[in-house]
Amino acid sequence: SLLTRTTTILSRAVHFMTADDYTHVSIAFNKNLQPLYSSSRKNGRTLFPAGPCKESFKRGYLKEHIDIPCAVYKLQVTPKVYDRAKREVKKVMKNADNYHFNIIGLLLCRLNIAYNRKKNYFCSQFVSEVLKRSKALNLPKESSLMRPSDYMELPELVLCFRGRLKDFILNVNRQTIDIKNA
């Protein structure tokens, strides 16, 4: 998982309300974290449309804003769980136009009120659902109450990197970070 705190209006608002170090979470299935999957802005420039999307260091928001803080965590799972998680993401991505961003759920999450809407996710809810449905781990709370910062507290996740996104990308490109064996 990649945790970030971007400079978008929504991210700044979430950070202001929560004071969390990170306001966004994405999931990936390889050590270079490409592609990343999340529920976020779909075009990189405007808040909407938003929903399930692929994120990349080579284009879009992350390419233009590489000086943001990030943390990378890994989760060791069996090949069976890994395949289930990839299938979950693939299923959502195949039908991404039928999914939307759960803005109401995001607001209620801060108030600790669970709010699930079918085919509507905010970023941490999306990642949580993938992990839950694939049986990768038991979450400490309802998916719609998980915040990006909650992932830092999960004992099953191992911190592999913390710093600036540009440094992570540079180190992965130089292969000085081996997430698989970290």
Image (tube, grey):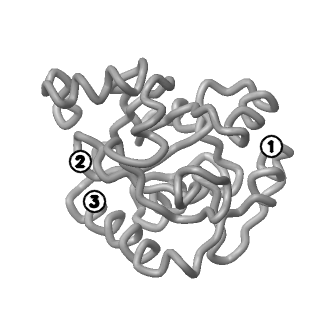
Quadrant of the rendered image containing residue 131: bottom left
The amino acid on which the numbered mark 3 sits, given as a three-letter code, is Tyr
Residue sitting at 52 percent across and 65 percent down?
Answer: 52
Q: Dot 1: what SS?
A: helix
Real-space Cα separation, disc 3 to disc 2, in angstroms: 11 Å
Q: Which residue is mark 2?
A: 30
Of mark 1 and mark 3, the one earlier in the sequence is 3
Of mark 3 and mark 2, the one earlier in the sequence is 2
- Label count reads 3
Percent position of residue 180, x then y:
19, 37
Residue sitting at 31 percent across and 53 percent down?
Answer: 35
Real-space Cα separation, disc 2 to disc 1, in angstroms: 31 Å
Of mark 2 and mark 1, the one earlier in the sequence is 2
Q: Identify which residue, 173 or 118, lies in the foreground.
A: 173
Residue sitting at 73 percent across and 68 percent down?
Answer: 116
Q: Which residue is mark 1?
A: 110
Real-space Cα separation, disc 1 to disc 3, in angstroms: 30 Å
Q: Nearer the viewer, mark 1 or mark 3?
A: 1
